[in-house]
Amino acid sequence: MAADKAGDLLRDYKAKRNFAKTQEPAGDAPKGSKSGRGSFVVQKHDATRLHYDFRIELDGVLKSWAVTKGPSNNPADKRLAVRVEDHPLDYGSFEGTIPEGEYGGGTVMLWDRGTWEPIGDPHEGLESGDLKLRLYGERMKGEYVLVHMKGRDTKRRNAPNRENWLLIKHRDTYARDKNTLTTRFTRSIETGRDLKGIASGTKPVKKTRVPAEAVWHSEPENAEEINKAPQRPKAKPDKTPAFRSLQLATLVDSVPAGENWLFEMKYDGYRCLAAVAGDNVRLYTRNGLDWTEQFGALVAPLQKLKIGSALIDGEICAFDDKGRTDFSTLKAVLSDGGRLEYFAFDLLEADGKDLTKLPLTERKARLEKLLSKTAKNDPVQYSSHVEGHGQSVLDALCRDGHEGVIAKRANASYRGARSKDWLKIKCLKRQEFVIGGWSPSSKRKGFASLLLGTWEGDRLLYRGRVGTGFSQDMLAELGQALEKRQRKTSPFAAVPKDRARGSKWVTPDLVAEIAYTELTGDDILRHPSFIGLRGDKPAKEVSMEKSQSLDDDGEAVAEKLGVRLTSPDRIVYPGQGITKSQIVAYYEDVAEAMLPHITGRPLSLVRCPQGRTKQCFFQKHDTGGFPEQLRSGSVVEKDGEKQDYFYVEDLAGLVAGTQMNVLEWHVWGSHFDDIEKPDRLVFDIDPDEGLDFSAIVSAAFDIRDRLKDLGLVSFPMVSGGKGIHVIVPLRPKAEWPEAKAFCKGLAQTLADEEPQRYTASLSKAQRKGRVFIDYLRNERGSTAICPFSVRSREGAPVAVPVGWDELPKVSAANGFSLAAAIERSKNEAWPNYFKLKQALTAEMAVT
């Protein structure tokens, strides 16, 4: 009966066509959808007048409307939609040409497809002229309504009246204030061709089920494979698995050796976590953004897998004309339409079971089985690997122009953080940078180059300019984006004067992918080239990515010193991907400079057992359970009780502390062998929120000069936090009460002389707009951060000694990274610090 009804509905369609001349499908045996939704399709039709044919499956046929200006996702647009004859279902996969002289002669593009469901009874909606529908397309999404303008139907002589309808977008999450559908998507959803390419017979872009010939074919042997509209698996009520943090790779400068490593191609695309539960699909970026709409072309292929539920890790890519994954091509496909590929390389969940604790080899085996039914030309593909022979794999990929290789430990579990279980080795240098400004062009409207930077703590550091690699479309898109973000002040911590002159500044929230040949000694890009804008990574997370040496192995250092280092690859600083092993390697590099400042002193430790971003705590006393290399000694407290305090004697002590998750080393101002007499004083300059760093630098010089007037030499240290420490080395002569009184007197004198600038009060209310000169570090039992200690703060900053001559050039207290601190440790910033024999005397008292 359904077939008879469909045949009756198709009489007009068949009467208008000569199937001996046109290869359009005759629709002799219509097949309806068996799912809870019907199919829908939109075909861009370059006939006498360019229009879009909007078709929905109902009663075994495609109900059709010709939309003159094309569909819109702007609810303010009311698009005229002229009702035309019903079409057969197999017309829904037609892309090709209709010969001239035939009805509808011209080029037909498959512009969108998907499924739809009615809101209410669809037959009543058609009859009343108010058909509400919900679309699940690759481009058209959300709720629409077709409204029949009954009083405005066109009456035609010797022809059926023309029904005029309006196609209107409902206001929902897919609605936009400006139409982005027909302007953004200009190519076939199936073959990636434009109208000209279809008409001329250009071969489809990459793998496709649609024939390369320009004219429609409907041979019986090809009908099932080519002409059949894609069928969706029946929707299931299952919720998709929740997003979870992705495992990230550490950039290294060489390939690991051994058979315990799997090597995969490094794809040049968008990282994507696919959450699938039957017909329900969610696609997430590496930071958890739901980009199901942007990656909509992959929803149907993932639904086609017909799996219960799964959480799959992979990369979304597009191929360039040389058969390589290419980010610029991917951006163009997302903008203009075309074919997307999803390379799946890990399986985190399957049917509700967490698989992340399994070895990688087992997870990949399950993933391969899950995808075993996918054909070679399907958009979803299993990402294969090679066991061992990493250098050969890298050489082959680089030779063919690919981006690089990812090395993964074969037996490792999946951890949602950056680690050395996954390594990336690149053929060319490229990474993300933040756009902070632009230089105007003298030859054209807009910009000549972009000013780039990366974040280090809360400072945006200038990394150079890029002026090549832009297409005309990208120049226009970037120009508009930059205009919207203009600001009066530079977002960079500092920019060379010749680069800053004439530059325009922008809010630094745009992220660009940049290729370059190398970095200069001060980390400025050489020969950079623009690849594209990225929307999957927040600008605040963009830091300078430098390759690590595989030989820089903290685990080996610890083993050599007799310390058992557990979880060496555990991420301590997520923003930088710094591991426990790397902290150990850092202390090995700076030990010669750091140990003279820490050896033999009672310590207070800041411990962070779960890394910097989790709960940290101070620990003063040895409660047992620590490695023997981290020693302890007794100190008599003020109440007469003895307490065991930590101390170190060598690098082994620092490594033992790192094993126990110590991220900060705070030292007493005296040694165990003369506990009551300080041998260093510390003035901690602590600014009120909002004060410029220059106010802190100025305060440091004021303290230096006042100390100098009293005959004391001092040394500055950036704390790795917000302030500067001015440190005075002493011969241990005066005792703690005398030392504290001296420091309090000096701080109070400065506060009394310039109360608008300084305060010596701990009260927050007294600090408003002022610098607090903290003298309270100078009493028995108080501590201050040790030179070259890392800090448990964002960016992994280090407390670093600087010289008075370079302090005016320092722009922040947290500007020294691990690498920068290592370099500093090789050059003595405090000459004669340990040779000075100065001491506090009664004549120095400040009143």
Image (cartoon, helix red, strand yellow):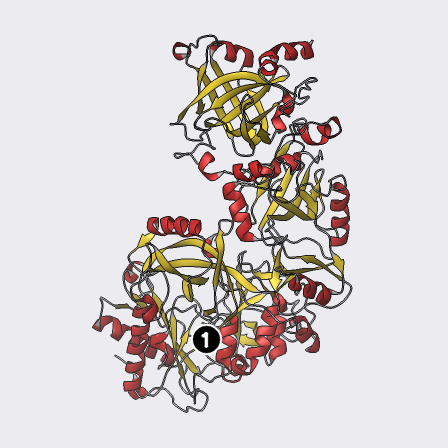
655, 34: nearer the viewer? 34
750, 427: nearer the viewer? 427
Look at label 1 and name its amino acid: Val
Q: Is residue 806 visible?
A: yes
Q: Is residue 289 visible?
A: no
Q: Is residue 398 left or right of residue 843?
A: right
- State the image coordinates of residue 94 (x, y, percent, origin top left): 61, 29
Q: Is residue 704 above or below residue 10?
A: below
- State the image coordinates of residue 756 (x, y, percent, origin top left): 22, 66
- In which quadrant is the N terminus drawn? top right
14, 205: nearer the viewer? 14
Dividing the picture into quadrants, the one containing residue 60 is: top right
Q: Residue at label 1?
A: 800
- In which quadrant is the C terminus drawn? bottom left
| Crowding at mark 1 (Cα within 10 Å: few <14, some 14-19, many 20+) | many
> Dot 1: what SS?
strand
Q: Is residue 358 left or right of residue 603?
A: right
* Residue at 75%, 65% in the rendered image: 389
Q: Is residue 720 above or below residue 311?
A: below
- State the image coordinates of residue 527 (x, y, percent, origin top left): 48, 68
Q: Is residue 489 above or below residue 656?
A: above
503, 676: nearer the viewer? 503
Dividing the picture into quadrants, the one containing residue 241 is: top right
- State the image coordinates of residue 139 (x, y, percent, origin top left): 53, 34
Numbered circles on residues, count: 1
